Amino acid sequence: MGDNSSFWDSLIFAHPVCVNWKSEAEGSIYHLASILFVVGYMGGSGFFGLLYIFFLLGLGFLCSSVWSWLDVCAADIFSWNFILFVICFIQFIYVTYQVRSVAFDKEFQDLYSAMFQPLGISLTVFRKIVRCCDEEVVTLEKEHCYAMQGKTPIDKLSLLLSGRIRVTVDGEFLHYIFPLQFLDSPEWDSLRPSEEGIFQVTLTAETDCRYVTWRRKKLYLLFAKHRFISRVFSILIGDDIANKLYALNDRVNLGKGFRYDIRLPNFYHESVPSTPKRQPADHFQNNSRQH
C-alpha cells in the first residue's frame, strides 16, 4: 500500500506548480489547430459526417505536429500528434472508399433522398434493399399493363419511380398511382408469406413509367435476415395503403349503392338492402284489438 501511495503521490505532486505564466501567446499554428479541433467535433453522423470529422481532426493534428516541431521542439508531442494525424488520414481514406462503394444510379439516389433518408436509413442498409431488386429499374411503356385482373399472380412488390399508373376493375376507374407509391401494396398486405393470389384489378400505364420491383420470396428472405428493413417496409406499405384509401374515399358513394375497392379487403362498404320503415306502436295495437 505504501508503494502504491508513493507512486500516486509522485504522479500527482511531483510536478512543480506553475508560478510564472508565459506572457506571450503561442503561435498562430497552435490556435489554428485548436479551432480545427472545435469545428471538427461539431460533425454529424453517417458517412459524410465521418468524412467531415476525420478531415478537420486530421488537419488539426497536422497543425499540432508542425507547432510542436517548430515552436515547442518536443519530440514526444510531435510524435503523438503525427500518429493521430496518420490515423485520421487512414480513416478518411477508408470512409471515402465506403462512400464510393455504395454509390447508386441517379434514380436510386433520388429514391433514397426522397423516401428512405428521411426515415434515417443509412446508405449501407439501403444498399441491401437495392441489391434485393438486383439494382434494376424496369420500364413500362404507355398503355402496357403491369397486371391484369384475374390473370397476373401476386409474386412481387413494385415501387413507381416515374410516370402514372391507372387502376381499374371490370373496366371501371378506381384511382391513379403516382411516383413514390407502391403499385401492389394492397395485394402484398392481403396475403401471408405462404399464400398465393391473383390480381383483382388491372394496372395500366398512362404514360411511360419506370419502377423498381422486388420478388416476393427474395424480399421475405431479406426481411428474415434484417428485421429493421422489415419494419421499414411495413411502415411504408401501411402509409401507402392509407393514402390509397383516402384517395378512394370520395368515390365510395355511388348513389343508391356502395362500391368497395377489392384491393382493400379490410376497408370496404357492402351494399345493404334498404330496411323497411318501422311501423308505429299504435298501428300494432289497433291490429291486435281487431283480432
Image: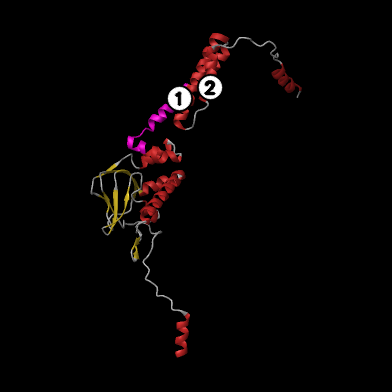
Q: What amino acid does circle 1 point to?
A: Phe
| Residue 37: image tag | 2
Any magenta on residue 231? no
Q: Quadrant of the C terminus?
A: bottom left
- The reply to whether discs 2 and 1 touch (Cβ–Cβ < 8 Å) is no
Q: Nearer the viewer, mark 2 or mark 1?
A: 2
Task: Say what secondary structure mark 2 lies in.
Answer: helix
Residue at 44%, 28% in the rendered image: 95
Q: Is residue 38 left or right of residue 97?
A: right
Say which of 250 and 215 sits in front.
Answer: 250
Q: What amino acid does circle 2 point to?
A: Phe
Magenta stretch: dominant secondary structure: helix
Q: Which residues are magenta?
A: 89-110
Q: Quadrant of the N terminus?
A: top right
User: Could you tell me residue 200's position as x and y percent?
Assistant: 31, 58
Say which of 153 and 168 sits in front.
Answer: 168
* Residue 271: quarter of image: bottom left
Q: Earlier in the sequence, mark 2 or mark 1?
A: 2
Residue at 36%, 49% in the rendered image: 216
- Structural crowding at the residue carrying mark 2, measured as other residues with C-alpha within 10 Å and reported as few (<14), some (14–19) or many (≥20): some
Q: Is residue 67 left or right of residue 291?
A: right
| Residue 92: image tag | 1
